[in-house]
Amino acid sequence: MKRRRDRKQAQGTRTPTRQVVRRNARWSLDFLADSFGALREFRILAEIDDCCRENLYLAADTSISGERVTRELDALARIYGKPGCIVSDNVLCAE
C-alpha cells in the first residue's frame, strides 16, 4: 500500500493588508469565469477601486490576454490617474 505524503505547510507569515483611505491608493484585478450552458465559456476581468469599492471596468470575452489587460489598465490610468498599487488575488503586483 502506498504511503500518503504530508501536506506542505505554508512558509513565512502573512501580513494583513492595510486599509485604504483614499481613492486610487489600491486597485484590485479579478478574473471570473462562467459559461453559456455547455456550449461556450467566457471570462470577465473586473477592475475595482478598493477605497470606495467602485467597479472601474468590466471586460467580458472568451479569452483575455495579458496585452489586453495592460491596454485596459493604461486606459483607466488616463481616466482616473495612476493607482498607488495594484493587487490581484491578494498578491501585490505594482507599487
Image (cartoon, rainbow, N blue to C red):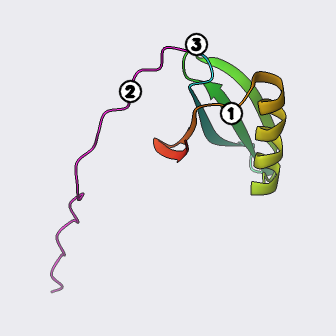
Measuring from the top left, give residue 40's x and y in whole percent. 80, 50
Of residue 32 and residue 9, the one placed in the foreground of this image is 9
Image quadrant for the N terminus?
Answer: bottom left
Q: Classify 10 Å Cα crowding around label 2: few (below 14), some (14-19), many (20 and above).
A: few
Is residue 54 placed above or below 62 in the rendered structure?
Answer: above
- Tag 2: amino acid: Arg
Q: Quadrant of residue 10?
A: bottom left
- Tag 1: amino acid: Ala
Q: Does residue 58 belong to the magenta stretch? A: no
User: Badge 1 is on which residue?
Assistant: 46
First in residue order: circle 2 vs circle 1 = 2
User: Mark 3 falls on what kind of element?
Assistant: loop
User: Badge 3 is on which residue?
Assistant: 52
Magenta part of the protein: which range? 1-22
Q: On the picture, is 14 further left or further right than 57?
A: left
Measuring from the top left, give residue 42's x and y in whole percent. 76, 46
Is residue 22 placed above or below 92 in the rendered structure?
Answer: above
Q: Quadrant of residue 2?
A: bottom left
